[in-house]
Amino acid sequence: MTPCATRSLYPAQMATIQGWPAKSRGDALDYSLYLAPFCCDQGETVIRLTVDVPESTGLTLLWSALSPDMATVGLQGGTAGQQAVTLTLETSMGRRYVRTVQVTVLDDGGSVDGVRSSLTPPDGGAVHPPNLTLPDGRILTL
């Protein structure tokens, strides 16, 4: 799977709340954040991604993954309205960035809202945290 460019966001230069495109409650979609703006020194990379999806959002975090250029999350479900997801990025130089991104969830009244999606992480992306990947490559979900 390649992250969808239409749901990929270039982060603002300052800490601010930005928004991803809206999704319907029944959608299972990938959303990405480009990493280059967070790497200031030559050779600096983002080495850790932590994603906070509050239970009140109704969103299900299917997975989170880091590739060399993007932090990508798979989101499903959600409570209708404006919801916030917080990404914490840590770099190889010890910098830490916390960014909140909003996504509007539209009520679709769909019949698949409770069905777990088979959306997979991006090709070559490392699932974070790594200890949530089972030995056979499946992603452990709660």
Image (spheres, grey):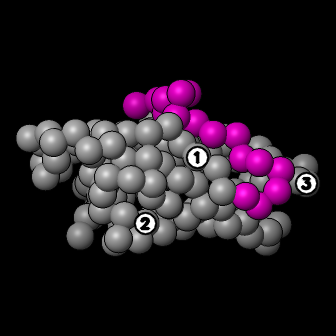
Which segment did they paint magenta?
A: 1-16
Residue positioned 66% across, 56% down in the render:
17
Amino acid residing under circle 1: Gly
Residue on which the image places disc 1: 19
Q: Quadrant of residue 56?
A: bottom left
Picture layout, residue 59 above or below residue 125 = below
The mark found on residue 53 in the picture is: 2
Residue positioned 44% across, 47% down in the render:
104
Residue positioned 60% across, 61% down in the render:
100
In the rendered image, residue 52, in percent from the top left (x then y), is placed at: 48, 69
Picture layout, residue 34 above or below residue 46 = above
Residue positioned 57% across, 54% down in the render:
101
Residue on which the image places disc 3: 41
Amino acid residing under circle 3: Asp
Q: Are circles 2 and 3 on residues that touch, CB within 8 Å? A: no
Q: Is residue 7 magenta?
A: yes
